[in-house]
Image (cartoon, rainbow, N blue to C red):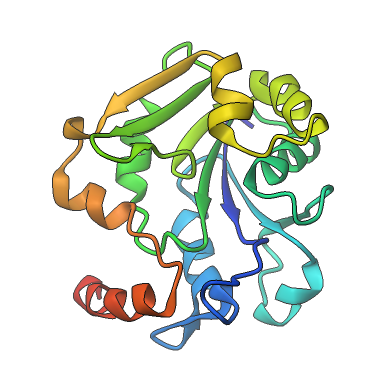
Amino acid sequence: MKTVAVILAGGKSSRMGRDKAMLPVNGTPLVAMLAERWRDVFDGLVLSVDTRERFAHLGLEQVQMVEDARPEAGPLAALETVMNTVPAERYFLTAVDLPFGNPELARALSGRMGEADVCLIQRRSRGVEPLFSFYSRKCLPAVTAALDRRERSFYRGLLPYVRVQKVPEDQFPREKLARSLFNANTPEDWEAGQTMFRLSD
């Protein structure tokens, strides 16, 4: 496969106080809604999870689930596991707590990657966005090296060691970008997002 979309859903949801993946969206668990959204955007779809059993009741048999090989080691470790399990040229990372991620924006970002190993959106005030980004398979050795030295940060463990394409945020429609990068980490975030969900119906 050329490009695989990866939904990160292995976190503990400690700040939310309940499982973010199971939050209801119009009667559908958030993770199931996201799986449907990203299923046909690229050449494949992977759900990165802590355990398959957690999602067994959702009927996601058509979605490939990959269990973390380094449990509780964060998104960088999840990326390593997926790269080691699912052969592809590139991996698009998104997260279960990015409920409004826009496939059109993701495709546009993909077109800016060129020969880089990583392609990210550069925010004016928040740095780059590592969890709505593309990673070449060529990143795998650097990812593993970072984790082996117990460095879990994309910023410190990976980005300094690979070729990075940073795309300024002003190259994307402002409202579409704001929605796509809206992060629901806490109950307050989730409550604020409910109006956005209704508006998107």
Q: Position of residue 52 (x, y in %)?
A: 79, 67
Number of numbered labels in the structure image: 0
Instruction: Determine if residue 153 is in view.
Output: yes
**Residue drawn 24% across and 72% down?**
196
The N terminus: image quadrant: top right
Residue in the image at 49% along x and 32% along y: 134
- Residue 112 visible in the shown view: no
Q: Is residue 7 above or below residue 31?
A: above
Q: Is residue 24 left or right of residue 139?
A: left
Residue positioned 77% across, 36% down in the render: 150
| Vertical order, 193 against 158 (above or below) | below
Q: Is residue 18 left or right of residue 187?
A: right
Q: Quadrant of residue 47?
A: bottom right
Looking at the picture, tell me which residue is in the foreground, 94 or 122. 122
Residue 72 place in picture, x, y as percent = 75, 56
Quadrant in the picture for residue 126: top left
Question: Can you give x and y, in whole percent of width and height, for residue 76 in the image?
Answer: 66, 40
Q: Nearer the viewer, residue 141 or 197?
A: 141
Q: Quadrant of the C terminus?
A: bottom left
**Residue 113 location (% of width, % of height):** 41, 21
Q: Residue furthest bottom?
A: 27
